[in-house]
Amino acid sequence: MIRHYISEDIPAVLEIWLLASIEAHHFIPETFWEGKLQEMEKVYIPKSTTYVYEDLERQKVIGFISLVGNFIAALFVSPQQQGEGVGTTLLEFVKKKFSKLELTVYCKNNSAVHFYKKRGFQIIQESIDENTKQQEYTMQYLP
């Protein structure tokens, strides 16, 4: 079930974000992600509109998507539940809310680039992330 994020979700959201970030971004040191946890909790999540995917059977949040306007700032699924359609379900949920969506993704995160391309996103720009010095794509979805 998809629902609005509530403050009680923060431990699950942070855990998902950290574990999935480390797994997906093997080309960035784990310490970088660990160092961003407090910023995620105190800055990024509060400034965004976040929806969580709660597995009602497990009574557990297993994924989330955060938006700033029509920009997807985060889409993460617990590594144990990846491949079960949670990310696609969250993405389809926000596609119904916006006529256009944008996001950035690291070029080396091949599985994420493929995921978004398969769901209709196009690469519109390539740049360097100032924080990590890694190349990233800006991708856009237009229905």
Image (tube, rainbow, N blue to C red):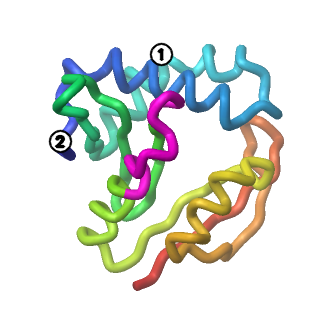
Label 2 element class: strand
Residue 39 in picture, x, y percent from top left: 48, 23
Residue 35 in picture, x, y percent from top left: 62, 15
Quadrant housing residue 122: bottom right
Task: Please name the amino acid that badge 1 sits on.
Answer: Gln
Q: Which mark is residue 4?
A: 2
- The magenta segment: 78-88
Q: Which mark is residue 89?
A: none
Residue 6 appears left or right of 122: left
Q: Residues within 10 Å of mark 1 (few under 14, many from 20)?
A: few
Alpha carbon separation for disc pair 2 and 1: 21 Å
Q: Which residue is mark 1?
A: 38
Quadrant housing residue 54: top left
- Residue at 19% across, 23% down: 59
- Total number of numbered labels? 2
The image shows residue 109, relative to residue 119, as above or below, that is: above
Question: Is 79 in the magenta?
Answer: yes
Residue 139 appears left or right of 133: left
Which is nearer the N-term, disc 2 or disc 1? 2
Residue 10 appears left or right of 114: left
- Residue at 19% across, 29% down: 57
The image shows residue 34, relative to residue 65, as above or below, that is: above
Task: Please name the amino acid that badge 2 sits on.
Answer: His
Residue 63 in picture, x, y percent from top left: 37, 37
Nearer to me, 39 or 82: 82
Question: Is 86 in the magenta?
Answer: yes
The image shows residue 137, relative to residue 111, as above or below, that is: below
Kindly report which numbered mark, 2 or 1, lies closer to the viewer in this rendering. Answer: 2
